[in-house]
Amino acid sequence: MAKRIGRSRRKTRHKLRKSIKERGKISISKYLHEFKLGDRVILKAEPAVQTGMYFPRFHGKAGVVTGKQGSCYKILIKDINKEKTIIVHPVHLKQWQV
């Protein structure tokens, strides 16, 4: 087997970049945003905050809130054919609008 090269943020220069309009100080309401069980959310990484960030492969995916663990949320997403649970800080989550 070949050795894995790099860390979790490798090759994410464009994926984790903010647009010009989004730059600046992050509001405190993003940190303290509350989600209910069963809420649909979109994974949208906040590159300025590394804590509680998910693996970049799941960027832009939609999922369902299944629980809470500390200050983070457990999100159930479907990755190809498997259902996976990832733990994400609310600063990296966005409410899904229908």
Image: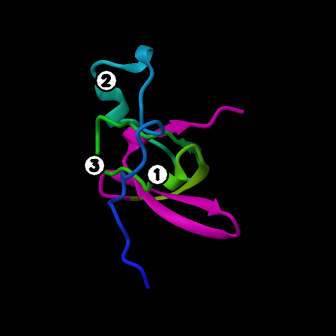
Residue under circle 3?
A: 51
Rendering coords of residue 36 (x, y %):
51, 47
Residue under circle 2?
A: 27
Query: Can residue 37 be found in the magenta stretch?
Result: no
Rendering coords of residue 47 (x, y %):
35, 37
Residue at 34% of width from left, 28% of height from top?
A: 29
Q: Is residue 38 visible?
A: no
What's the CA distance linking mark 2 and mark 1?
A: 23 Å
Rendering coords of residue 70 (x, y %):
30, 57
Asked if 72 appears above or below 13 in the picture, the reply is below
Q: Categorize mark 3 by other alpha carbons within 10 Å: few (<14), some (14-19), many (20+).
A: few
Q: Secondary structure at mark 2?
A: loop
Q: Mark 2 touching mark 3, by CB under 8 A?
A: no
Depth order, front residue of 88/50: 50
What's the CA distance linking mark 3 and mark 1?
A: 13 Å
Residue type marked 3:
Thr
Q: Quadrant of residue 78?
A: bottom right
Q: Secondary structure at mark 1?
A: helix
Residue under circle 1?
A: 56
Q: Which residues are magenta?
A: 69-98
Q: Where's the N terminus, which quadrant?
A: bottom left
Q: Where's the C terminus, which quadrant?
A: top right
Asked if 41 appears above or below 29 in the picture, the reply is below
